[in-house]
Amino acid sequence: MAKLIDSFGRSIDYVRVSVTDRCDLRCGYCMPKQFHDFHEPEEWLTFEEIERVMAAFARLGTRRIRLTGGEPLVRKDLPQLAQRLSALPGIEDLSLSTNATRMDKHAADLHAAGISRLNISLDSLHADTFKQITGGKLEKVLNGIMAAKAAGFRPIKINMVLMKGVNDHEVEDMVNFCIQHSLTLRFIETMPVGDSGRAATEHYIDLGDIRKKLEQRFELIPGVMPGGGPARYLKVAGTNINIGFITPISQHFCATCNRVRLSVDGTLYTCLGQEHHMALRPLLRAGIDDKELELAIINAIHLKPERHEFKEKPEQILRFMSYTGG
């Protein structure tokens, strides 16, 4: 039975662990192109420290871990960490969020280490638009997706952040791409996290409008997907493809939030859209014992706010998405 219950009765059984704040792409809604104010390696949690924190979470009822960044594959020897986390008693699901630019080199090792599911960011199928959004090469991501399929990851979820006037004309093409390659597709609304995120909201699209557009082209029926995230799914009739809609702005899902985020420097953030947090790294390096660590985590969970305020206070969050962890 889960022991992590917040002040609003929500069971917290899912932790997103950022292993780095660095990335080899520069998506405009996540990290400014000229940003270089990264944490130094000595500020990162070591693999041993991450394992210790997640073991404490597991003893308190956490069952799901997602490795994120920045771009997690930038962190050296990531399969070693994945192997250690997947072996923790109580952990039932270990997944990874990635831009897949390096997946062709690491897919087999990551799968063997115990990662079963992937979320891959892909905002465009056109090389020029992809470069405009990310600064990178589309071909690397497509090669990474194919390598992930070959390695046996199931399911592979494609995350597409929709931006009006940038990539919204590609919605149907992305659905067809995912049907062709047996990939789950998730559309995501832009969020005002940091200066870059607030700038991206100029291109905000209500995903309710996208759903209506898709219903004119595809027959969509109720669908479900395993996982602990916030997407609401519909299935494309006649296929095995689900389409998810992640709507933090138009239809927030705070009442069912079951997750917290551990940043690369050991800060535990209890809400993506608020500043409530607890610094665990100083406690770890001061010699805190396991019972004290569990108590610190329990106290942090009680800091978790009822909801974000993206609409009411879009200027509130100063940190970048890449800093917090996806």
Image (cartoon, rainbow, N blue to C red):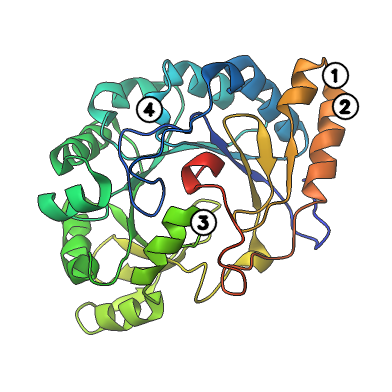
Judge by depth and name the residue closer to the eye, 294 or 261.
Answer: 261
Dot 2 lies on which element? helix
Marks 1 and 4 sit apart, C-alpha to C-alpha, by 30 Å
Task: Report the amino acid beneath label 4.
Answer: Leu
Give residue 73's mark.
4
The answer to which quarter of the image holds residue 284 is top right
Please tell me whether mark 2 or mark 3 is closer to you in this view.
3
Picture coordinates of residue 102, whole percent (x, y): 27, 28
Judge by depth and name the residue closer to the eye, 13 or 197.
Answer: 197
Dot 4 lies on which element? helix
Marks 2 and 1 sit apart, C-alpha to C-alpha, by 5 Å
Is 220 placed above or below 132 here? below
Residue with the mark numbered 3? 193
Q: Residues within 10 Å of mark 1 (few under 14, many from 20)?
A: few
Task: Report the amino acid beneath label 1.
Answer: Asp
Residue with the mark numbered 2? 292
Residue 17 appears left or right of 4: left
The residue under the point 57% across, 52% down is: 318
> Disc 4 or 2, which lies upstream in sequence?
4
- Pick the quarter of the image with the N terminus: top right
Picture coordinates of residue 174, whole percent (x, y): 20, 61
Please tell me whether mark 1 or mark 3 is closer to you in this view.
3
In this rendering, does residue 126 appear at all? no
Q: Residues within 10 Å of mark 2 (few under 14, many from 20)?
A: some
The residue under the point 11% across, 52% down is: 128
Tag 1 and tag 4, C-beta contact below 8 Å: no
Residue with the mark numbered 1? 289
